[in-house]
Amino acid sequence: MTNEPLWPPHRMWFGGDYNPEQWPREVWADDLRLMREAGVTVVTVGVFSWARLEPREGEFDFAWLDDVLDGLHSAGIGVDLATATASPPPWMALHHPDILPVTRDGVRLSPGSRQHYSPSSATYRRFAERLVRAMVERYAKHPAIVAWHINNEYGCHVSHSYDDESAAAFRSWLELKYGDIDTLNDAWGTAFWSQWYGSFDEILPPRAAPTFGNPGHLLDFDRFSSDALRELFRAEAAILRAATPEIPITTNFMGFFKGVDYWSWADDVDFVSDDSYPDPADPFSPIFAAASRDLMRSLGGGAPWVLMEQAPSAVNWRERNAPKPAGMNRLHSLQAVARGADGVMYFQWRQSRAGAEKFHSGMVPHFGEHSRIFRETAAIGAQLGGLDDLIGSTLHADVAIVFDWDAWRLLEQQAVPTALNYREIVLGWYRSLWERGILVDFVHPHGDLSRYSVVIAPAMVVADTQTQEALEAFVDGGGRLVMTASSAIVDEKAHIHLGGYLGELRNTLGLGIEEIAPLAGPDLAATGQAPVPATAITGEITGEARLWREFVHPSTATVLSTFDDPIVGGWPAITVNHRGDGRAWYVATMLGEEATDALVDLVLADAGIPTTRERGSTIEVVRRGNRVFRLDHATGEAAIEIVDEVGDDTA
Ligand code: GAL
């Protein structure tokens, strides 16, 4: 072993989940041959191997894994070794059914698929920790290992469990947070509907109930559930860190995944990694994928990350699973590198012959190596080898979008003014910036805003004092802030900001809101298929206003556009408030594409940020280090140009 640090790597990670236990040993040698041919540098081993590593309770069998790791090492391939705790073996559920998670409706889930453990199960955690200790004892010094891969996609299938053990853990979490029950009663507003609690012992998880649950209760259970998973991660990480501080640790995130607040996890991993499965049949996929890449980079504070999983072609878990057309695999891979990834990996190396994912594509498909998928994948491996000098390089964004899991959770609760989709709203703004070639960071509301010229805070329904002060300071420091409807309506306890919503942001924005006036179509509840209800705005910016309107009272703000409809006609739809060199725009609705674009153009021009892309162009252009990536999502073609300047910037 050399003493060089394992992260950042010296070669781009390229490879995938490798599950040799699914195959007879004869195939293993062929795997190594093909991996070398494809330019594989790293594989993730052992993600679903627990039943093979501990076939009976307390009885470990590492011999086969020794051979796998030795073989990979002799082929020069690094191993991202999974702790294998993602899917407990059948014996565990049989002998210790207390590990099984329970749904909101009280159904205790059975084994037979994967991830069948309650995040708060002490039994599961004890077994997981024992396995991790055995793994690290065995492999601490193995020269193939380049990283530890803890568990797999925490919360993917079970992000919340409503079992009794979770109930007890939730109560402890609440007690720690609130200290005494009166504080909790105040926070949750339990004066309403006779929900007052006499002690913490009376509190249950928000199980299926006759009607709407208490918003504070629901929000805290979401926060608790994310934390419970993080505790599991931390327990494994502590064991690994103590034994092998030199081996970096990651766990694979899932992009915009509502169940887990990744901001609160990001500091716990040595590098961020992500699983990304944009639908090849969805024309919005390049934008969605770009946003996921930018989120991953942002979670790590700009540090390089790894695309840990993507599909070489079709997945098998949508109703209809489109293959990737020629070029798309390469485009998605290079897009990740352009947006800060130091590795591109797949699920999985060899397409399974049996089991629930046998119709999911693999780098080596059922047909074998003489296939379009293998050829294209190997070509990507070769191309990545030529980008090793980009490793470690970072990007700089002038524009940030505020992204907040609490806003997501609250906005999509029941009993709100109208049903909204937070991710869709955020991606609506992202789309406009992406189409203009503007690199975007995502930022937590408490993050450092001073690095940006423009900050957009879409539907940020919750704003505590710190957030209000940070946004005001940003504007007072000369920043350009855009806030949209359904923002800062409540505080961190989900209590209304009385007297015009927005809290202190009323000063920043120069307005207050008298009333929320959603748009509604008669069929929405009945079919869910009704067109998005919309109206019009007119003035400096014209176009469509969707879903949401407000009756806005400007104080110091100037009105740019007004609503043009029978209910809020003539009331402000878009305003701007000047504070020193800074400006704060407010949009009292969800703008259609045309109006979003017009406002984005106006704000970028005002901030002096040039747009680099021609309108209507399908070519995504991103600069990282001394490379300019041109990714044509219409033709599938990708070009990488070497430019003179080396630095932290984008095209
Ligand atoms: C991921 C998971 C992999 C595999 C893949 C299929 O969510 O981590 O194990 O199931 O999806 O697309």
Image (tube, rainbow, N blue to C red):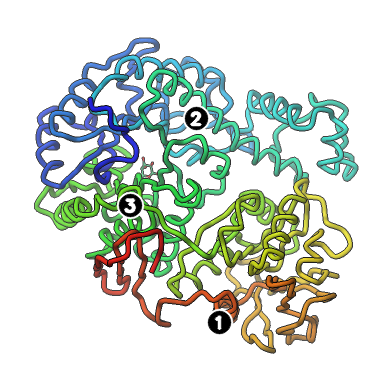
Which numbered tag is attached to residue 391?
none
Q: Nearer the viewer, mark 3 or mark 1?
A: 1
Badge 1 crowding class, 10 Å Cα cut-off, few under 14, some 14 to 19, many 20 or more, is some
Cβ at disc 3 under 8 Å from ligand 1: yes
Q: Residue at x 55, y 20 (%)?
A: 98
The quadrant in which residue 104 appears is top right
Q: Is residue 494 left or right of residue 397?
A: right
Q: Considering the image in quadrants, where does the N terminus appear?
A: top left
Residue 205 visible in the current orientation: yes
Q: CA distance from mark 2 to mark 3?
A: 27 Å
Provide the residue designation for mark 3: 315
The reply to whether discs 2 and 3 touch (Cβ–Cβ < 8 Å) is: no
Name which residue lies at 28% across and 15% down.
61
User: What kind of residue is marked 2?
Assistant: Phe
User: Which residue has dot 1 on it?
Assistant: 594
What's under tag 1, amino acid-wise? Glu
Instruction: Name the residue: 75% across, 47% down.
Output: 492
Residues at marks 3 and 1, CA–CA distance in whole angstroms: 34 Å
Q: Secondary structure at mark 2?
A: helix
Residue type at numbered disc 3: Val
Residue at the image position 38 percent from the left and 58 percent from the top: 339
* Image quarter (top left, top right, bottom left or bottom right) of the C terminus: bottom left
| Residue contact at pointers 3 and 1, CB within 8 angstroms | no
Q: Is residue 640 visible?
A: no
Where is residue 276 drawn, in percent x and y? 39, 51
Q: What residue does disc 2 label?
A: 233
Image label count = 3
Quadrant for residue 128, please give it. Answer: top left
